[in-house]
Image (cartoon, rainbow, N blue to C red):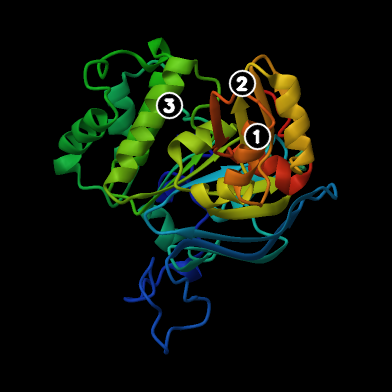
Amino acid sequence: MGEASATGPDTADPRPDGADPRPGTEGTRRVPADAGPGTVDAGDGVIVTRALTKRYRGGQLAVDGLDLIVPAGSVFGFLGPNGSGKTTTIRMLMGLIEPTSGTAHVLGRPMPRSARAVLPRVGALIEGPALYGFLSGRDNLLRYDAADPTADPRTRRARVAAALDRVGLTAAAGKKAKAYSLGMKQRLGLAAALLRPRRLLVLDEPTNGLDPQGMREIRALVRELASDGTTVFLSSHLLDEIEQVCTHAAVMARGRLVTQGAVTDLAAGARGRLVVTTPDTGDAARVLKEQGVADVVVAEDRVTGEAPERDLAEVNAALVTAGVRVRGFGVERASLEDAFVALTGEGFDVAG
Ligand SMILES: Nc1ncnc2c1ncn2[C@@H]1O[C@H](COP(=O)(O)OP(=O)(O)OP(=O)(O)O)[C@@H](O)[C@H]1O
């Protein structure tokens, strides 16, 4: 894998002072009272950052005081428009670059100091997999596995076969990687990340550049990987992707955290829209405004507006009393996009 892929210990930036795995200080386990300096009680946080900040040499403040908590077992979506600081954060989490200030703990250990101890338990797919095009998918993985000094050569073939099977590449394993589609290459990168059992998978824009079918396949694969309890942290600039795949999300804008939490809670934070279906749209719009409904919009036989805080039964009764023939009345669930707009006051305006 390439220089930016921190999938194994050989590609990390290990610090000699980080290689002292102490029982009880890893991952989600509670840190005992006598735990040494540098460890944190991360509770259930597989990734915990405090005031994490990165200012690049040119002066660009890419990440600004980030406090992130990624719960164990979650599929955590790291969402933000292009340039909002996602890749910079991931590079700090993987120990590839140093923060300017603040701290990052992964599996309970400080990064980048403990990279050597932490990274073997983290599978990462960052900036696309680097593959040898002239080698088959299987041979790429064999070679990759061989670069891991802790991997037992006697079980190598079985390990590679299992990883290929896991990502659905068994049938194509003998094909040269240069003949792979982008989606197959992403799968092969994931297989490389899955050669060992992992506590955490970190995937930077795993569906970037894929066609809709390829995106669906990778999303299904992520769900499957998560179903066995592996925590998955994935970045995306696609709101619907996060809604489809993730249990939790953090939203970034211009280097700062806008919000984080369970996806259902985030969406619930933005009130849904009241939707009235009626042939009498003009009268319905008037009555809704009288009832204090804001942002009333008429489109064909639907009149929508911001769901008011008052009892909706009263609003419905007012419509009927005014002679509006109501065919449908309800509140549409707010989307993560609604939440983003409500939180930032801006549209989620990105390409892709
Ligand atoms: N090596 C670097 N040197 C200077 N500035 C950088 C560097 N890498 C990123 N930046 C800047 O930092 C900001 C955040 O970039 P980053 O790549 O972390 O965002 P992102 O959310 O991952 O966006 P994208 O989805 O486009 O990759 C951007 O303004 C970017 O131009």
Residue 245 percent across, percent down from the top left: 44, 37
Q: What's the distance in space between the residues labelled 1 and 2, CA to CA? A: 14 Å
Position above or below: 257 against 172: below
Residue that label 2 marks: 278
Which tag is nearer the camera, tag 2 or tag 3?
2
The residue carrying pointer 1 sits among few (fewer than 14), some (14 to 19) or many (20 or more) residues within 10 Å by Cα, namely: few
Quadrant into which the N terminus falls: top left
Q: Are marks 2 and 3 in contact (CB under 8 Å)?
A: no
Looking at the image, tell me whether mark 1 or mark 2 is earlier in sequence order. 2
Looking at the image, tell me whether mark 2 or mark 3 is earlier in sequence order. 3
Position above or below: 41 against 121: below
Q: Are marks 3 and 1 in contact (CB under 8 Å)?
A: no
Quadrant into which the C terminus falls: top right
Q: Which residue is drawn at 50% across and 48% down?
A: 264
- Numbered mark located on residue 321 in the image: 1
Residue that label 3 marks: 186
